Structures are given as C-alpha cells and as structure tokens.
Image (cartoon, rainbow, N blue to C red):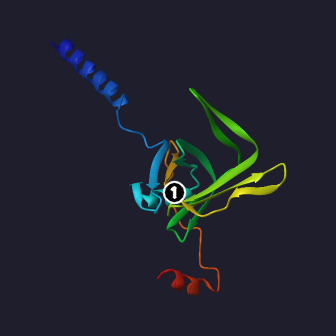
Amino acid sequence: MKTTNHLVKILCLIYILCCSCNSTEKSNAGWLKVFQNDESGNVIYGDKSKLIDAVRLGYPVRIGWGGNRVEHIADATFLTIFEGKEVFAQINTIIGQAPAIDNDSLKLRFRTQNHWTKISGTNGYATNFMTNYLKDSIVGGGTDRYTATTWYVLYPEHSLDIEAKPLWRKESKNWEEWNKKNKK
C-alpha cells in the first residue's frame, strides 16, 4: 500500500512538472506589432507609449505600409521621437523596384538607376524621395503625404529592468515661443 501511494505521488509530481514545462503562455519576446496608425494619425491598434518606450530603450523597430496592391516592411534605421509624443522612422535607401505584370505573370523588377527612401510618422505623415544614382540627382518624391503605418518592435528574450527616460530637453532659446505658437 505504501509503495502504491509513493508511486502515485511520484507520477503526480512528474505530471505536474511536465505540464509546467509545456506552458501555453505567450512570450513577449521577438517581433511584435505594437502600434498602427491611420493616415490621419489615429490609433488603429496598440499603444503609442509602448513604441516610444521601445525606441528609447534602443529596441529594433520595423515599419510596414501598403499601396498599389503591394505591402512593404522595412527596418527603421533612424528614429526620432518628437516632444515625447510622435515617432518618425526613416528606412535605409534601397534600389527602387516596380511590379511588372504581363498577362498571368508577375515579376518584381529593379529600377536600375533609382534609389528610394522613406520617412513615416505615427501622426500619419510620410514622405519619400527617389534619386538617380547614375546622375546623382533627385528624380521624384519629396512631397508630403499621409499614410497608414504599422510599427513592429523586436523585444529581447529577457526584458530589461530599465526605465525608458526621455533623451530630449528644451535647448533652443526660441523653444517656449515655438511651443506656444504650435500648441494652439
């Protein structure tokens, strides 16, 4: 009887250990969609403050956007937080590309002379421009646009116990005047 009770206890312990190792809890590590804004800067998904904290902590960010039947996702290589309220992301310059649709065939071809880059903001603002690198001249873009953007953050496997503090401060003599004029 003692042996049976002892065996049952051991089996129960093994079962509990196995169940705890196979936890179905979702991890917050890896690439996660944290924020999405529409073309007017309205929140579609998430919490902008989480994106701002991630940028301040130096976590990698990607942005996603779409248009003309395509979707793009790119690493943000230069990030700006303005007054702790809006995030702007610039992507690395890429060789331009364009879809080529011939009957049932779809190809994505390089624009052999063009480089392209983009800036997107959580307020819906976006701009881009294209350069002809053979002639070293701007050939397109540079206009203000407003577009929806999705923001992704790469969270580390082990979260850091660091407070995401602002990196900016009022440095311009004209800052107070500018702030009053633009806060109306």
x and y percent of residue 117 in the render?
A: 67, 53
Q: Callout 1, which amino acid?
A: Thr
Does any portion of residue 116 appear in the rendered image?
yes
Q: How many marks?
A: 1
37 horizontally vs 174: left or right = left
Q: Is residue 63 above or below residue 8?
A: below
In depth, the one of 30 and 123 nearer the eye is: 123
The residue positioned 63% from the left and 63% from the top of the image is 143
Residue at (18% x, 17% y) in the render:
5
Estimate the x, y position of residue 81 in percent, counting from the top left.
Answer: 56, 65
Q: Name which residue lies at 52% across and 80% down.
A: 182
- In the image, residue 101 sits, relative to residue 158, either above or below, namely above
Disc 1: which residue: 147
Q: Seen from this angle, which residue lies furthest left?
A: 1
Percent coordinates x, y for residue 145 in the rendering: 56, 61
> Which image quadrant is residue 83 in?
bottom right
Horizontally, residue 121 falls left or right of residue 1, namely: right
Where residue 137 sits, quadrant-wise, is bottom right
Residue closest to the eye, 15 or 58? 58
Q: Count neighbours of disc 1 (C-alpha within 10 A) and say few if under 14, some if 14 to 19, many if 20 or more.
A: many
Residue 93 in sight from this viewpoint: no
